[in-house]
Image: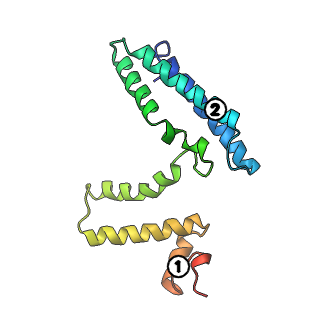
Amino acid sequence: MWEGDPAGQAWAQAMADLLVYANKQAAAARAAGVTALEAATLARSVDWYRGAVAKGIADNQRRRTEAARDGLRLARRFGAHQAMILRFATDLAVGFTNNQSERDVRPVKVQQRASGGCWRTLEGLAEFAVVQSYLSTAAKWGVDRLAALRQLFTTGPWLPPALSPG
């Protein structure tokens, strides 16, 4: 928003600056081994957030440009979803991005696009999902995907250590 209309959407730059600041504070707190941000840091972030939202609404409410309509819509959404957007700062167990979730979904979307947007059978979709889940879990445990497949077809499925029969 800010890049498209720097003069009219200064609030968007303030919001971006806040999110970068809050992410750095949360990362530093995680690295220090604490379970929550200091109350003053969290309060500063929340005040900054609310100020950016209020400015976004005020600056765009009476303007009639497309950028203003988009800015107002975005500012209102930021206001409505504050708890969800700032979750990474209020709950340090939650990461700033959802990159891992996106990476887990990507193979399904690529396969869907390659097959014309649909699966031939529900059984094929279920089998694909099982294989992708197995490979994704192995990768998250640091096991090479190809090594996990080799083990699957030679000695049996790889299982996470906590789930191994014993």
- What percent of the width, then of the height, locates residue 27? 68, 44
The CA distance from mark 1 to mark 2 is 52 Å
Residue where numbered disc 1 is placed? 150
* Residue nearest the observer in this picture, 80 or 109: 80
Question: What is the number of the mark on residue 158?
Answer: none
Residue 143 visible here:
yes
Farthest residue to the left: give it.
120
Number of on-image labels:
2
Q: Label 1 sits on what residue type?
A: Arg
**Which circle's residue, 1 or 2, is located before the other in the chain?**
2
- Dot 1: few (<14), some (14–19), or many (≥20) neighbours within 10 Å? some
Query: Which element carries disc 1, helix, strand or loop?
Result: helix
- The residue mark sitting in front, 1 or 2, is 2
The secondary element bearing badge 2 is classed as helix
Q: Tell me what residue is drawn at x 63 percent, y 48 percent.
A: 92
Of residue 89 and residue 6, the one placed in the foreground of this image is: 89
The amino acid type, in three-letter code, at marker 2 is Ala
Residue sitting at x 70%, y 33%: 40
* Quarter of the image that includes the N terminus: top left
Q: Residue at x 34, y 14 (%)?
A: 65
What residue would you read off at disc 2? 43
- Image check: 71 left or right of 120? right
Colour scheme of this structure image? rainbow
The C terminus: image quadrant: bottom right
Using the image, determine if residue 92 lies above or below residue 141.
above
Query: Which residue is drawn at the image coordinates 40% and 71% (left, top)?
Result: 130
